Image (cartoon, helix red, strand yellow):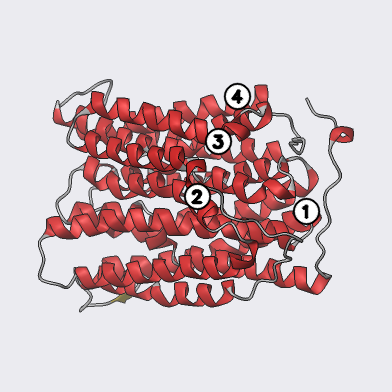
Amino acid sequence: MTDSADIAPAVECPLSLPQQKRNLLLFASCTGLQYFAAPVLYIGVTQASLCDRLGADARTANLPATLYFAMTAMPALIAWAIPSVASLRRNLAICYLVTATMLVVMAAVMILPVSNSFRISVVILQGAVAGSAMPTAIAFLWEAIGRGTDESRRGLALSLAFGAGPLLAVVGSLGSQLLLSGEMGGWKIEWLEYPWNFVCLFGACVPCMLLAAFLASRFVVPLPDVDATREPFSKVADLCGGIVLGLTALGLYHIEWEMTGHTMLALAALLFVHHFRDILSQRQLLWATLVTVLLYSGNTIPSNMNLYTSEVLGDLPENYAGYQNTLRFGFKVVAGFLLGWILTRTNPRAGILLTGCLFVAAQLWAIFATGTAYLIAFGLYGAGELVGVYAPNYILSASRPTQIRRNMAFVTMLMVPAAPTGYLFGAVSDFISNRNITAWDVTNSRALGFQASFALCAALMTLGLILTLCLLPKRPKQSS
């Protein structure tokens, strides 16, 4: 365990207090805009509903989310390709512009005279593009706040960004519910039927990303005395090989070549481990990495949670997608404020434990809840989703300033080894459903398949919590 006396003194930010406050507000604003567009940027619920509408099975409906997480290796590759701190603001703006462009494509393809199979392919493509652009933007935001504010203000920044930010996600989710179902409360939009409901939803999020691109250019980033330069390609050849093999493995899984897919995935994992061996050779960061991967498996379950709506509520998943996202982010508002406050009074490990427990609770609730009470699972899930903030914060706390970009790019791509669990959860559901397996009091094999995937997800995350308690110190040392 680490004693507070072992902690190296934090390096103070060279910027003035007004400049730091400006960065803090920009960080919160960009995060808030991402949250406002969350119904389409958080790949999972909306995309699964759309795939279901287009006639896809559970495995295919999980592919957009699976590819999203598989592409989160891109920030590490971009960190190599553009290492300069001076280009940080420009690159952050480009990420938002690429995301806006893909949303325009999504809106257009819904009204063009193309087949549903083509539309499904574009939905899957959106998962890949969002998986490349948005995690890269998040990594750049972490770097901007890491370089542009003192560590002592980080808890305030997280509380503001991930407490107030989800309020916008609640507004966006209610708006998406109105657009997708055509009614909410006493409001009804008669003309807004499929596919125009999805066209309006994707199109409405384009201005959000354009505004985020503008705000990203307003950060004040202190430059190092000597800026970083790009290393030879040989330094990232193993990383590129791992990305290619990982994507190949997902393709092989989809055509049911499981054994070959397992082999490809194992080789990809070895290449990733080799590339980041300098980080993984540090015991503290190694265990933190394993814990993060196990807990991140929870990020791949919302597609199944949405598809299960038809079994537990007897209605189309898309008719509840907006309410599900509203609860998801409404709970996140409260949890975001509380967890940021708790962080200022406890330690980095506490954030991982609290969010992990909420993540597990969401799956347990999903298994046993019936009727409209099932929707509470999405609220618990949203609060637990903040593990994506507090697991990176733990590793950030263990990183020296010279390590920030590489370590945070590494953290962002930790969804890559967790990505196949999304496809696994979909495959488990289809396996039980297609073979009409029933057990206990569950006579509906499709419902049992979804419940089994929830139980598997909870088991993986529980293992991560056990490792956290046993192996991670409360306050990490900054690695040398």
Q: Position of residue 10 (x, y in %)?
A: 83, 48
Read off the residue under disc 3: 276
Q: Where 440 sits versus 358, above or below?
A: above
Q: Earlier in the sequence, mark 4 or mark 3?
A: 3
Q: CA distance from mark 1 to mark 4?
A: 26 Å
Determine the residue positioned at 43% across, 78% down: 207
Residue 261 versus residue 201: which sits nearer the camera?
A: 261
Q: Is residue 226 at least partly visible in the picture? A: yes
Q: Earlier in the sequence, mark 2 or mark 3?
A: 3
Labels 2 & 3 near each other (Cβ < 8 A): no
Q: Where 397 sits versus 175, above or below?
A: above
Element class at badge 3 = loop
Read off the residue under disc 2: 382
Read off the residue under disc 4: 467
Determine the residue positioned at 31% across, 25% down: 263
Residue 109 versus residue 193: which sits nearer the camera?
A: 109
Q: Is residue 391 left or right of residue 96?
A: right
Q: Position of residue 414 (x, y in %)?
A: 50, 40
Element class at badge 2 = helix
Q: Position of residue 191 (x, y in %)?
A: 20, 79
Disc 2 marks which amino acid?
Answer: Gly
Disc 1 marks which amino acid?
Answer: Glu
Read off the residue under disc 1: 151
